[in-house]
Amino acid sequence: MKKDAPIGIFDSGVGGSSIWKEIHQLLPNENTIYLADSANAPYGNRSEANIVELSIKNTEALVAMGCKIIVVACNTATTNAIDLLRKKFKIPIIGIEPAIKPAALGTHSKSIGILATKGTLSSALFHKTSEAFTKDISVVEIVGEGLVTLIENGAIESLELRKLLIKYTAPMLVANIDYLVLGCSHYPYLIPQLKEILPDTVTIIDSGEAVARQTKIMLQEIDLLSEEKKAPTLQFFTNAETSTLEFLLKEFQGKIAIQKKEF
Ligand code: DGL
């Protein structure tokens, strides 16, 4: 494998672009290929078998495009499929999980909230991690039903979305949380609104930076960090319309290529 081979990143849709931003910030010389499986989003209400099937399809596509490492930028795909992906593919695979540990270590009120998809919250991997770190802590788990679809449709600033955020965070506030864990890679795009809705006493955390750091550590370990000095190739493929990705990545306009493609 060549050091300038791309990092492959996939998500059920546009949300993992929040993870791509962290990876690109930490590893600005790396070539990247991002796959948004928006035609099949949301994954959150699908069966485990179906999520595994879609995750294999996405990984196969990225491997066929010559990627040196795969980042599963989707909590739902990670918590349901990463063990199988690691068994099936030889290539290193980095996943993303809700950041329960830092929230559990940081909480003073001994109460934390987790907003994630049904698929993540019902997964065995999520339960295992949650049980390991939250023994003396109360955890308010809320399914963010409808949020991913609204984000996919570009309705981030809609009243409908704001109403859902108010509804989903209300029981968390009643439970006196001081940490909100965003357990879905689409949700970092909701942080500005969540900050307006939640009091300053609530710290909002996501896993994007940790995933970027983990990707760098893995590339160092396998000696595949890029040594390129020229501007990287930053490709985005979606199997639906390109407009939402273009909106979410507008600050990178001119530096990235976003295309529609079947995969
Ligand atoms: N970005 C995915 C995640 O992190 C969204 C899941 C979905 O498509 O429902 O869980």
Image (spheres, rainbow, N blue to C red):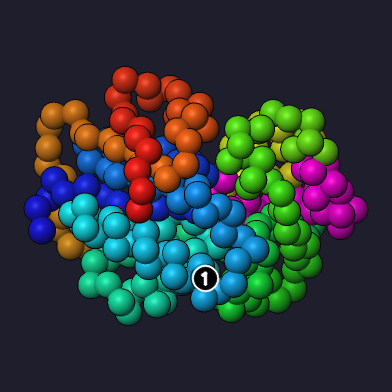
Mark 1 lies on a secondary structure that is helix
Start and end of the magenta stretch? 164-186
* Viewport quadrant of the N terminus: bottom left
Considering only vertical position in the picture, is 231 above or below 30? above
Relative side of 260 to 18, left or right: left
Residue occupied by mark 1: 50
Relative side of 74 to 1, left or right: right
In the rendered structure, which amino acid carries the disc numbered 1? Asn
The answer to whether residue 54 is seen in the rendering is: yes
Considering only vertical position in the picture, is 227 above or below 77? above
Q: Residues within 10 Å of mark 1 (few under 14, many from 20)?
A: some
On the image, the x and y values in percent for residue 130 come to: 63, 72
Q: Of 261 and 72, which appears nearest the observer?
A: 261
Question: Magenta stretch containing residue 176, yes or no?
Answer: yes
Seen as rendered, the residue at the extreme left is 2
The answer to whether residue 208 is seen in the rendering is: no
Residue at x-position 63% and y-position 47%: 148
Relative side of 137 to 128, left or right: right
